[in-house]
Image (cartoon, rainbow, N blue to C red):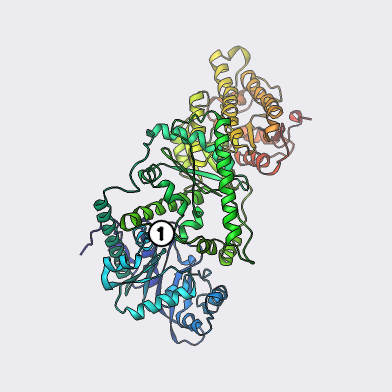
Amino acid sequence: MEKKFQHVNDLWNDTKAAELGDDQVALFLYRSNILGEDLRITNYGGGNTSCKTIEKDPLTNAEVEVMWVKGSGGDIGTLTRSGIAGLYTERLRDLKKVYQGLNDEDRMVDLFNHCIYDLNSKAPSIDTPLHGLLPFKHIDHLHPDALIAIAAAKDSEKVTKEIWGDTMGWVPWQRPGFDLGLQLEKCLIENPGIRGIVLGSHGLFTWGDTSYECYINSLEVIEKASQYIDAKIKEKGIVFGGKKIESLPKEERLQKAATLMPLLRGLASTENRMIGHFTDTDVVLEFINSNDLERLAPMGTSCPDHFLRTKIQPLVLHLTTDENLEDTSSVLEKLKPAFEQYREEYKHYYESCKHPNSPAMRDPNPVIIIYPGVGMFSFSKDKQTTRVASEFYINAINVMRGAEAITAYTSLPRQEAFDIEYWLLEEAKLQRMPKEQPLSRKVAIITGAGGGIGKAIADKLVSEGAVVVLTDLSEPTLETALKTYKKDQAIAVPCDVTKEEDIINAFKQASLAFGGVDIIVHSAGLAISKPLEETTIKEWDLLANVLVKGQFLMAQQGVKILRKQGLGGDIVHIASKNGLVAGPNNVGYGTAKAAQQHMTRLLAAELGPDKIRVNTVNPDGVIVGSKIWEGEWAEGRAKAYGITVEELPMHYAKRNLLHEIILPEDIAKGVFACVGILNKSTGNTINVDGGMANAFVR
């Protein structure tokens, strides 16, 4: 019989589950993935799941129980076999014989490795004993907003009893680790027959004999908690003390956010460059516009999974909704002291809570920034991390909302929060993170990125760690290009580079999506090859508008953002060998390309004091994969050289010194050299043409 839920989604598909047969590990992974699809149940990287099976010991051939559990740093929503650890359950339980108390937690994590059954295991997480010391075949440890609201409410144990009676256990807050596993085991022994356990200020444990029973048990417990909170909110009548201010209309909020984002990004990047994210959902606005914002925000989050990603508390901006954000100097006068105070408070938090062996203080800048009436900003090392931080703070908002409706919200003591944030095991996890790529933390905007050279440039920059804003005149081409990237790697914005309003919008979308921009690449182009007397004014204007005016407008609007951020930046222009070499039947195109090249030199001289580098990449003969060689341009060049269109690729390869065919990917490498390697070069021209002696710039 199908279960009906209002507050969670029952995503179990009997047909899909039946296809997995009796493979308990596959069913556990399936359960994990559908649990992770619902952010009300657990967020990215939050919670963990497990199952226990009987396997054959490879050394003794004896049947042994093996626990399969999410490994360290994994995400249940995307969990696969490569992301789980397989451990001998009995060996894990034998660790009770050598455990020496709370000061022994770090050593116990190393001992988990002595319990490994599957040699391809992911590193076991700190939560491994919480699953291993419980006897159930399938276990879910989740962080549903509703359950954390109950866990973080004043009188949480009493509230738990009121909701579930004797069917749920409760254990007080304790840092995750081996001892917490012992407390769960003790709770179960003292309360046989319970269906789950609420962890104070932390989350939920539920279980079942089968993967499906475990899944439904989790949903039922979360549903009951959600219904209880809904009833309390209706009884109370208001949330967060009611509304203090009104939100601006949607478009005004977005305009304010886009204008402010580069300033916030610059201030949040004093230690490390950050990528931004903005959200103004109803849940966010209800909280940030409320009377209780000033009381609740400084209290900080309760669940470890929350504050590890959001920092213990947000920065609340004291800007009015009618603030003139275009007055950059005036706004910075208000923002700088707020950021400085936040950093000082974070430093005090670190200094007052640190231990002799604590890791060095990390970046003291805020992750979550609140602008009442407008929305919520987040800043972190990449788009996924900052988006997830935003989602986690929304979870924290939901927790505060529920806890306040029940009794009152309680947060973790600062020392407890610090001991998790600066736990040596957490530091070790951070140290294991892969080395950042050359363009990590960078935002690139590329014109003409729907295909050809522009798309190749976008591909290269993404492969080196950047996030990209694809712009192009052709929306269908743009949509096709966007589909080639993963979530959080790129956005697409239709843009006619001859229209100032389109370029302004493209930079607005870049700011809203990523916080600003670091790399501006003007690759949009077209080519018309005609002799002087056949070149029309319309064609002359089109070439000048797309190649020269477009380049000018991109630089003009982009520099406004680069200067707001104060982080320097790169501008790269895709010109052509034809701007250096006089060839036949090419007056319009060659003149426009020469103008592009000289504009590079002019801008390099002007923008150097701002640490903004401006360089040119000069292609030649990029026929394969290049849009401009479609149609009349190829025919015109073939006619100019007295050959056929089919002979053009070999003609261009033979005429360069290296006899190489030049591809869009080669131009992309030239751009990467400018923005990722040559960080002390500006005003330069890089020829990517196989070697054309008459195009040598010196």
Q: Tell me where residue 590 sits by quadrant.
A: top right
Q: Residue at x 50, y 33 (%)?
A: 259
Q: Nearer the viewer, residue 235 or 429?
A: 235
Q: The C terminus lies in which quarter of the figure?
A: top right
Element type at mark 1: loop
Please, is residue 449 above or below residue 75 in the view? above
What amino acid is at disc 1?
Thr
On the question of residue 450 being in view, the answer is no
Residue carrying label 1: 410
Please, is residue 139 above or below residue 634 in the view? below
Q: Is 80 left, or right, of 460 in this rendering?
A: left
The percent position of residue 513, horizontal first and vertical second, equals: 48, 40
Crowdedness near tag 1: few (<14), some (14–19) or many (≥20) residues, C-alpha within 10 Å: many
Q: Residue at x 38, y 79 (%)?
A: 135
Residue farthest toward the top in the current orientation of the protein: 533
The percent position of residue 20, horizontal first and vertical second, equals: 35, 68
Q: Tell me where residue 642 sits by quadrant.
A: top right
Q: Is 461 left, or right, of 182 in this rendering?
A: right
Q: Tell me where residue 353 sits by quadrant.
A: bottom right
